[in-house]
């Protein structure tokens, strides 16, 4: 049944989180050393960014693991929504430990500028970080693109609309990390060329603003799913087609879909059955259809009722 079957999408997302954690931890350590040696404001901002991302991966790991617990008496719809709670923590962490620290450090550097040195170290670390962050981003991009193709969406559209907050967070954070590395390189380079720490400080602030925007978007998406995000029309059409293609269903008059976790739906539908079943067989047929629907990875629970003759049929 739905609570015990293996979820392949979840295992793929967990792998993406592990890769992101490993890359961010290595990058954070390297950036911290570079920031200490060079005194660059942009490198300090990047170090704060990477440590925030590393800590966030722990929250995302918790989101993925805890949301997979089977449903029980106290949680009849399972623990899927825990993914949005822990992902919300990760987004707040990105905002406070990443964005706020970077912006404050940039402002402090403008007020009390400090010279930087050993720029070659910064360039080497930024290059290595770009490679490691790129590997993590490619993994997230591939998984997102695969999901987008299954739903006939564009990849970026899938990032925004996906019910999987963990994958969205890794994709967004890795993309922001790559952009931040380019900004940091520009700040360090201009600092070296001009001799002024101002471009470096501005780079730190730009990185912070970028992280703040990403964090706010992630917080808003998690908020929407926590309070009851409706499914998109393509998901509703897909479920309607699945029901109408069932051998025992002749007509569909009502369909309610609700997310109860990443890639998990609660389905309520009113249907008209094929043929003329005796009354004592109707409940048996409905329960069998519900069980068959729940065997699918995306359906946590299905509840079917009989449609009345005067109800208008729905078309996919």
Image (spheres, rainbow, N blue to C red):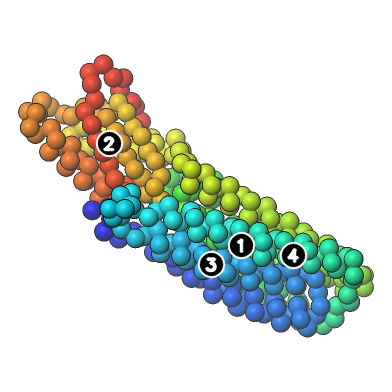
Residue under label 1, please give it: 93
Tell me where residue 132 appears, x and y as whole percent: 60, 73
Instruction: Identify the residue position indicated by label 2 in the image.
Output: 243
Q: Mark 1 falls on what kind of element? A: helix
Query: What residue occupies the far front of the structure in this picture?
Result: 74
Mark 4 packing: few (<14 Cα in 10 Å), some, or many (20+)?
Answer: many
Image depth: mark 3 or mark 1 in front: 1
In the picture shown, does residue 250 fall above or below 234?
above
Q: Which mark is residue 57?
A: 3
For the residues bearing labels 1 and 4, Cβ distance under 8 angstroms: no
Q: Earlier in the sequence, mark 1 or mark 4?
A: 1
Marks 2 and 3, how far apart in space?
38 Å
Question: From the viewer's perspective, is the residue at label 2 or at label 3 nearer?
Answer: 3
Q: Position of residue 121 (x, y in %)?
A: 76, 81
Question: Which residue is most to the right?
Answer: 195
Image quarter for residue 131? bottom right
Q: Residue at x 26, y 59 (%)?
A: 4
Label 4, label 2: how far apart the Cα atoms are: 51 Å
Residues packed near mark 1 inside 10 Å, few (<14), some (14 to 19) or many (20 plus) = some
- How crowded is the residue under tag 2: few (<14 C-alpha within 10 Å), some, or many (20+)? many
Q: Looking at the image, which residue is at 68% across and 64% down?
A: 98
Q: State if disc 3 and disc 4 touch (CB < 8 Å).
A: no
Query: Separation of disc 4 and disc 3 at Cα?
Result: 19 Å
Which of the two discs, 2 and 1, labels the residue nearer the N terminus?
A: 1
x and y, in percent, of residue 217 in the image: 61, 49
Q: Which residue is mark 4?
A: 102
Q: CA distance from mark 3 to mark 1?
A: 10 Å
């Amino acid at each position: 049944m739905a609570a015990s079957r293996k979820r392949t999408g979840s295992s793929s997302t967990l792998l993406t989180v592990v890769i992101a954690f490993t890359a961010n931890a290595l990058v954070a350590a390297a950036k911290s050393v570079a920031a200490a040696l060079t005194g660059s404001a942009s490198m300090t901002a990047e170090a704060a960014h990477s440590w925030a991302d590393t800590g966030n991966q722990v929250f995302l790991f918790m989101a993925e693991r805890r949301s997979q617990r089977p449903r029980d008496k106290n949680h009849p719809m399972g623990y899927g929504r825990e993914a949005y709670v822990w992902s919300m923590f990760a987004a707040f962490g990105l905002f406070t430990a990443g964005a706020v620290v970077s912006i404050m450090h940039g402002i402090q550097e403008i007020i009390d500028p400090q010279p930087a040195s050993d720029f070659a170290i910064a360039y080497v670390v930024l290059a290595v970080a770009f490679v490691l962050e790129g590997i993590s981003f490619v993994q997230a991009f591939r998984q997102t693109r695969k999901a987008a193709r299954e739903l006939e969406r564009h990849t970026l559209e899938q990032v925004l609309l996906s019910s999987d907050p963990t994958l969205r967070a890794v994709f967004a954070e890795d993309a922001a990390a790559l952009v931040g590395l380019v900004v940091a390189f520009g700040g360090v380079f201009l600092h070296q060329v001009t001799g002024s720490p101002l471009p470096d400080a501005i780079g730190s602030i730009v990185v912070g603003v970028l992280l703040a925007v990403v964090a706010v978007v992630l917080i808003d998406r998690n908020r929407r799913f926590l309070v009851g995000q409706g499914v998109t029309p393509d998901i509703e059409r897909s479920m309607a087609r699945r029901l109408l293609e069932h051998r025992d269903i002749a007509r569909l008059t009502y369909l309610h879909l609700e997310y109860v976790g990443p890639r998990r739906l609660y389905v309520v539908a009113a249907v008209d059955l094929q043929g003329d079943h005796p009354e004592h067989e109707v409940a048996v047929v409905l329960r069998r259809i519900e069980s068959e629907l729940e065997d699918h990875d995306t359906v946590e629970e299905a509840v079917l009722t009989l449609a009345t003759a005067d109800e208008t049929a729905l078309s996919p």
